[in-house]
Image: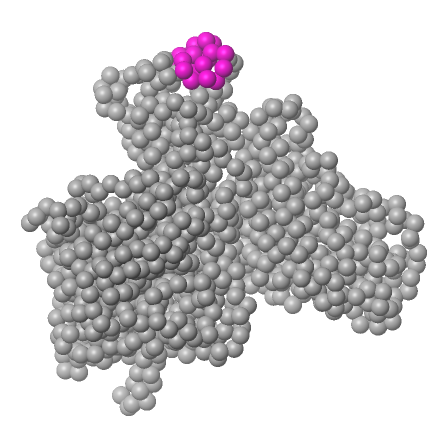
Amino acid sequence: MYYPPDTSGQFLALSSVLTGFNTTELQATGVAGQLWGTLERIIGVPIMGEMLSLAGRHFAKANSLEELEAIFKKGLMADPKFQPIAQRIIGMWYTGVWSPMPSAWSDVHGGNTNDGTFVISPAVYRAGLVWPAFGSHARSTNPEGYGAWGEPPLVPVNTNPPKE
Amino acid sequence: MSKAKPIKEQYDVVIVGAGASGAIVALELAKQGKKVLILEAGRGTRDDEEGWTAATEIFQSAVAKVPNAAFPPTQNAPQLDVLQFHNIQKGVPDSAGYAVQHGPQPFASDNNRSKGGTTLHWLGIALRMLPNDFKMKTLYGHGVDWPIGYDDMKPYYELAERELGVAGDVDEYWIPVKDKKKYWGDYVYPMKKTPDSFVAKQLKKKVENMKVELLGAEYTIHVTPTPQARNGDPNPDYKDPVTGKTVGYEPTGTQQDPLRGQRCQGNASCVGICPVQAKYSALRTLNRAQDAGRKKGVPVTIKNQCVASKVVIDPKTKRVTAIEYIGYEQDGFTQATFSVTASIFVLAAHSIENAKLLLMSNAANSSDQVGRNLMDHPTMLTWGLMKEPVWPFRGPGQTNAITTFRDGPFRKDMAAFVLPIDNWGWVWSAFAPEANVGQWVAGGMFGTQLRQTVAHDVSRQICLQWEFEQTPDPENRVTIDPQFLDPLGLPRPIIRYSISDYVRKGMEEAFKLSQKLFKKAEIKDATQYLPSDVVHIAYNGKGYSYRGCGHIVGTHRMGSDPKHSVTDSWLRCWDHKNLFLVGCGALPTFGTSNPSLTMAALSFRAAEAILKDLQQHTSKPR
Amino acid sequence: MNFKHKFRDLVRTTQPAEGAATLPLTKLVRPVAIPDAQSLREHLQVALELELSTLPPYLTALASIPEGTNLEVAGLVRSVMMEEMLHMILAANILNAIGGDPVLARKGVAPAYPTTLPDSDGSFQVSLQPLSIAALQTFMRIELPTPKGTPAKADGYNTIGQFYAAIMEAIVRLSKTGAIRFDHHPERQVSPSDYYNGHGKVVRVHDSYSAIEACKEIIHQGEGMDSGIYEQGHTIDGVGYELAHYYRFMEINLGRRFRPGDTPQSGPTGAELPMDWSSVKNMVSNPQVGWFAPGDPRRTLMEECNHSWLMLLRELEQGLRGDQQGLKRAVPWMLRLKLQAQNLMNVPSGIGDTMLGPSFELPD
């Protein structure tokens, strides 16, 4: 599958696999840059570079999203170095919150004074993907209008059980 | 001891606290051209659009979106906060937060100390008490009777509903009263009811008119729309509560931009912050009070960051002669003590601060009731997943409740309860949806599976809130202790608090009812009570967890007898005739109604008495 | 719905009707007049389209201001937009009262951008673009006050005021002769409680006076009255929403608020109106769905946005045709549309370093 040459494109491609939202949807939030900045600050460019390279190798092997997710599951998402970072990337995209790296990880790869529990920014909170994933909006933002809560969301959301 | 600098300006009335009760008193006085000073302990920085937007962003930036998240305190006016509450080990008081909690249960509700008070983050529910709620002792042998009854309160409820801007539907609202016509008269609310949430509609389809048994009697389940102080469609038939003329109603917009906030938009963050101020806050009434004062040529003065430190009493006349207060710079240490005089003084700093200030001043306590009878609505949650999506986290926190159990013969044996249907999924019970995501991701989920799991599960979340009536217990109390002081050197509240068997019995029965309701509504139960929960209690060998409801009531109750109460029914102190104590602390009991509307109604009543007293005061030669 | 040619055939000179003289604007000499009831209905439909055509550019400008920034400026743009909705409702109330059927949700009724104002003299173009000085100059041109003594003009008008003057003249004249009555579809009249978050009142139209009142509300909010900066009957309240639209846009343009005592000649001399122009989204002008192949996720986002526009128009149309709930149902689409517009402005267009934006295209 196509993997972009540039870092920001690669970060979007990686994020897309991790979140289940396509890269254009991710771009539309306008916060990808802030998320990448947080990773640069806390994880650092060298490790993030390795992670994007590994993701690129996964992309190269896959012919479909289904295959790609399967490769990720066995690869990057099973890698003790990258899995915790991937989980934090998902956390940022879904909820706007960075949660601290596990101490077992920091013991091996080094800690960082910027690490901790925090909301990246109000804009990142507002863009949280967990909300549109079930047809809503981050609390205190993007309201639907008077009385809209009495009906299902305007645009239907598929709420079937997930495939295993 | 006091080196207070006297303020030259002479006021008719000095009010301590710029929350709803103080604001209403100020409004009523300002309309009559009285000279009013309001002393506010905390910040007053949220009353323009920039301030409100900043507060909204503070809320959005908070990891834990607790009720006070948007409105952090200043250093010098600390406040109770739900993040401060812990389980208390026997014999080890928890002094980690602002209050020093002796337990056995922590008092788990917060308030806000800033201009606007706790209405900055309240949910906005505006229930009147039921007639039987005023006669608990006579009817059920619990608590005390009020010195006044529902009929006395009714005209003031109507004033309060206008001021707060309540949306509701008298015809559709089901409550256990014998004579509905007598309860309402020909009343209509200022605004039409807040539209029902989707989840409430779905639950109603499943459980409306279901028969259930409780302590040997049969009851019928009714899901009914909850009156609330939230802007909605105005009711053209609304009648002016004073003149009785049909005048309609116009919703009030935001502080600075009247063209926003005329309807609730469904930001789904009422507890926290209403970004468009479509939910009432006392800032509205403060604005009106200041407008009224300007019109009369006697402006209302509001001084922020002024913490009242003493009620000064003339030992001979027993009248209050001054209020001393400490003024401070923004979050800083520059401070000075002042003393201000007036004809009449009003404490309106909410239950805990009112009690504290009285105890600090050795005031109003000949009954020994100051600080006692602290109450809340302990709230037990039960939660699960509906069979079909109910689309939570959209719209106000609750639009409907099951009101069947607000009154009934069972009140002899167990606490009554009101049962709101939470419109925000498991946010209160399990920090959803953020905590759900955390768990799923920690379990290895990502991508398509994660997105689909969120869609499937969160869209089905439902939570019921079992809010129990707590009756007054003199041992549930606020005291002070010179060992524990805040940064200004003023005493912190010391709290002793426990949950009686009357409430615990209620929880036991309610839990059984919950299981019946869930079964009928095909809800997959996910309720879980852990000993580590704040707060966890036991009854008949079974554990229950509950939350504080933010309903802080009862520390300076009114009554008909100076021996057992702090004020008369006009909220005038028995001990000091020119001192009024307004706010939720005045309520002797409060049934299953969220206390704010009753507090507001009593504030109108107190203002009436203050105006009368002022007239007498000024007509008498001094 | 092509009125242009039709109206050109109808051009003729009419004297103002007797009695019309009590209404200030009917004093004007009228080279072109609206001849009959059917023509008045058609012109009111054009009025609807005219108000409608201003929504997309104003909404686009509003969405280009990042959320939570430039609050004062965003508030001004939002207030104008909300009032354009009111104007549409007012025009519909008149149209319904005289037996017309408002049409909104149809391609051609809502224009394709860039556009000229419906049935105007075509002297300027309106584009979908982010808030900028150029955009503001267009907005001010839309809301341009009509100089005193300018004739009313039903077709090929130069200012919106001219156009409404012609409508008002026709209302008075045709109601006097009995050619129009105002008793059609009273159930379709939108009432004041249905419109909120904008100042100005919905006027329920049931006779010629209320119809004229509705027209005046539109003109006064838009361009001001009698060469003053305020809407008639309003004084400054510190908020500035009583300023006519033209002057609200002038404030943003000049970065300064009006204050009491200011005149059109003095311009605004009050407080500074802060605006961080560098924060405005760099949206490409007049984007088109057709730039992208079907299935391209960028195209999908734009199509979803256009779907909201269509649904908004459908609900509005139903709301103006007697379905009381239609206006309520339109609001969520409006809010969604704004969010989608904001989101699009974060997605690179592929043209230079510009971003996408809403295109407000409707299906055939």
**Where does the magenta region start and end?**
A51-71
Q: Which residue is painted at 50% across and 73% down in the image? A: B239
The answer to whether residue C305 of the structure is visible from this angle is: yes
Could you tell me which quadrant the C terminus of chain C lies in? top right
Q: Which residue is painted at 81% across and 53% down in the image? A: C42
Q: Which residue is painted at 32% across and 45% down in the image? A: B519
Position of residue B358 in the picture relative to residue B615 (left or right): left
The x, y position of residue C102, in whole percent, is 73, 52
Assign the magenta stretch its main secondary structure: helix
Q: Nearer the viewer, residue B601 or B153?
A: B153
The answer to whether residue B28 of the structure is visible from this angle is: no
Q: Is residue A61 magenta?
A: yes
Taking B131 as reference, is C276 above or below it?
above
Position of residue C137 in the picture relative to residue B278 (left or right): right
Which of the 4 image quarters holds residue A117? top left
Which of the 4 image quarters holds residue C205? bottom right
The x, y position of residue C115, in whole percent, is 75, 40
Point out the residue furthest to the left here: B91
Q: Nearer the viewer, residue C123 or B217?
A: B217
